[in-house]
Image (cartoon, rainbow, N blue to C red):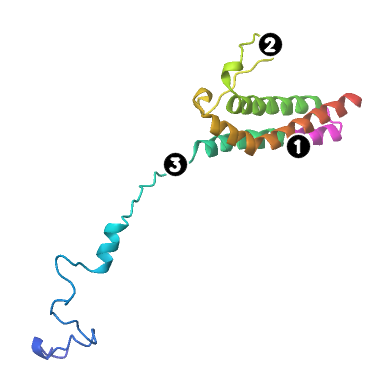
Amino acid sequence: MPPRTVLPISLLRLSHRIPNPPSRLPHPTRNATNPPRHFQLQRQFPRNYTTPIPNAKPQADQIVEELQELYETAQDEFEIATDSTNGATIYAASDRESARDALDQLVGVFALYTTDVAGYSVSDDSRSQVLSTAFDHRAIDAGVRGEVKRRVEQRVRELENAVVALEERAKED
């Protein structure tokens, strides 16, 4: 190993990193009463940052996601029922019933989320079902109800019409 050479600090040139080092003299226009311009701008226009909440979505988006999952389930059941009805399989009637149940679940949850609950009455109907929802439908704001209705209603109505048409076609056959 070659011997190391130790150079005195005075021989090292650090100025090659900074071509024109700033002078240490005070700036003629800056003093305690006249701070630099960028400090003045910060005082005139303060930045108010908010701390983002992780995984926080608006309530309407969360409700739409829940309804989307129910819609996809109902859509899958409808496609299975359509295939079995077109093929005239022995499972066609039960597949249509499953499609109707999935649609009823979707329509029921959609109605809970988009209509005022005060107008509902309790029914002892044998066809009534228990609806499980991720949100308390009584605590949903009217604006959120309108937004959810606007974003989801068209798809629910189209699927409802398709299931009704499938059931009518099956009755004719």
Q: Is residue 85 above or below residue 1?
A: above
Judged by depth in the image, the label closer to the viewer, 2 or 1, is: 2
Q: CA distance from mark 3 to mark 2?
A: 39 Å
Residue 18 against residue 114 in the figure, above or below: below
Q: What type is the residue that disc 1 sits on?
A: Glu
Q: What's under tag 3, amino acid-wise?
A: Ala
Q: Nearer the viewer, mark 3 or mark 2?
A: 3
Q: Position of residue 97 (x, y in %)?
A: 75, 24
Give the quarter of the image for residue 172: top right
The residue tagged with tag 3: helix, strand or loop? loop
State left or right for residue 161 relative to residue 25. Answer: right
Label 1: few (<14), some (14–19) or many (≥20) C-alpha neighbours in 10 Å: some
Magenta span has 86?
yes
Identify the residue under disc 2.
126
Residue type, mark 2 in image: Ser
| Residue 108 forms part of the magenta stretch | no
Q: Is residue 87 left or right of residue 5?
A: right
For disc 1, the marked residue is 79
Report the magenta residues as a range: 78-91
Whole-number angstrom distance, CA of label 2 to CA of label 1: 27 Å
- Image quarter of residue 101: top right
Local packing at callout 3 (Cα closer than 10 Å; few below 14, some 14-19, many 20+) is few
| Marking on residue 56 | 3
Looking at the image, do the residues carrying marks 3 and 2 touch, with CB atoms under 8 Å apart? no
Q: For numbered disc 1, what is the local secondary structure?
A: helix
Q: Position of residue 40 (x, y in %)?
A: 26, 63
Q: Residue at x 61, y 16 (%)?
A: 119
Q: Nearer the viewer, mark 3 or mark 1?
A: 3
Residue 135 is situated, as x and y percent measured from the top left of the image, at 51, 28
Label 3, label 1: how many angstroms apart (C-alpha)? Answer: 34 Å
Q: Depth check: 90 or 23 in front?
A: 23
